[in-house]
Image: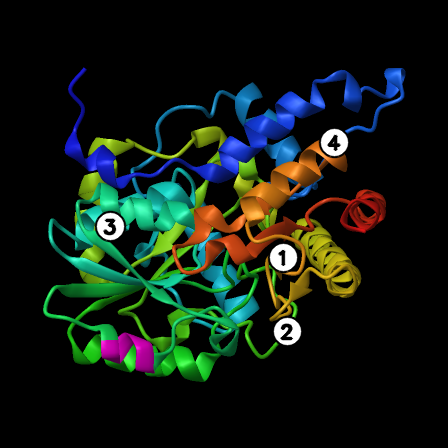
Amino acid sequence: MRLARRLDHIEPFYVMECAKAAAEIAASPACDPARGGQPMIYLNIGEPDFTAAPLVQEAAARAIRDGRTQYTHATGLAALRQRLSHWYAQRFGLTVPEHRIVITAGASAALQLACLALFEGGDEVLMPDPCYPCNRHFVAAAEAVPRLLPAGPAQRFQLDADAVRASWSPATRGVLLASPSNPTGTSIHPDELRRIDAVVRGHDGHLVVDEIYLGLGYDDTYGHSALALGEHVISINSFSKYFSMTGWRLGWMVLPEALVAPVERLAQNLFICASTVAQHAALACFEPESLAEYERRRLEFRRRRDWIVPQLDRLGLAVAVPPDGAFYAWADCSAHSADSWDLCFDLMRRAHVALTPGRDFGRHDPARWLRLSYASAMPQLHEAVHRLERALA
């Protein structure tokens, strides 16, 4: 079968390849408690162990029962856009008019729409290395070129203005960042983001910021939306992480006024609309009871971070930059192995703990790093550390 050449630029999603391997091992007798085995502990996938808040579940059931399941406007329910606008004002002190908010089928759809609207063949988009792999593949799917710039611990694994300035070429069209980041859980300091923005604007480029973990921040220094820089910034967000609605596939984007109509035209043709049931359910995310529950969960993730990071350091899996958001620790495994891919598969087999090797997240020394997700409950984290301690000894 003859396939489109764009597929040559889309690499396998190794996170999912590792997840399949973990599932195969988990189905073996070695992981069967009835046969004396240890069940697999999954610290590899970035999915909260919390499900949708109770009021959200009730709202979904009510929408189905009442027959509110037909298409919405391509940009989403007006009521949901209004609530998001109010949330920005309440949480971040920002004025974000509802007409600049577009509801999407997850942050993935938002990123696809942004890349298709802004970039074309031959355009370069600067991104940090490490970064979430799908983000660079959205760029590649638009037939643009993701250009990964090494970003080490001294830069908090994020781009800085000097790197953006030095790397900008005649082909560069924009910069795609994530703050907080997957896989590192680190954010860009607001002052540095302001300097990056000045470089991008000076070249008449686009600044796209993936903010899907913004609600899960633990340090007030970094808990600011890039939208504070001005209306020219394109922000991508999601109901998956902070609002615990991963499988509902619901996200949103905040756009400059001039970009709303072009993105709406793309959305009409590519997606029609995001899930109607999910949109009606998401209205309940902004009820006081739900918001209080999300804050309780955020503090629980912070408690897990505060426990797991010192444990990893103790085990020789040094976390060079403590995460200030999300629920990931980016650990240096070079004290135990020359290749995180081999180490992660070894730990899956021997300790029955699933971690994610660095191969997915970049090209600059990925074998040195692995990602641990602390989105699992504390008892699982305790047991995982116990097993890792024995295996790494």
Give me the C-alpha separation between circle 2 and circle 1. 26 Å
Q: Nearer the viewer, mark 3 or mark 1?
A: 1
The region drawn magenta spans: 162-166
Q: Nearer the viewer, mark 3 or mark 4?
A: 4
Sequence order check: which comes first, mark 3 or mark 1? 3
Badge 2 marks a residue whose secondary structure is loop
Q: Which residue is mark 1?
A: 333
Q: Nearer the viewer, residue 291 or 360?
A: 360
Q: Which mark is residue 115?
A: 3
Q: Nearer the viewer, residue 205 or 11?
A: 11
Which callout, 2 or 1, points at the residue further toward the start of the chain? 2
Q: Earlier in the sequence, mark 1 or mark 4?
A: 4
Q: Which residue is mark 4?
A: 40
Q: Amino acid at mark 3?
A: Cys
Per the model, the C-alpha gap separating discs 3 and 4 is 37 Å
Amino acid tagged 4: Met
Residue matched to label 2: 219
Image depth: mark 2 or mark 1 in front: 1
- The picture places residue 16, in percent across and down from the top left corner, at 50, 34
Helix, strand or loop at label 3? It is helix
Q: Is residue 6 above or below residue 298?
A: above
Helix, strand or loop status at disc 1: loop
Q: Main secondary structure of the magenta part?
A: helix
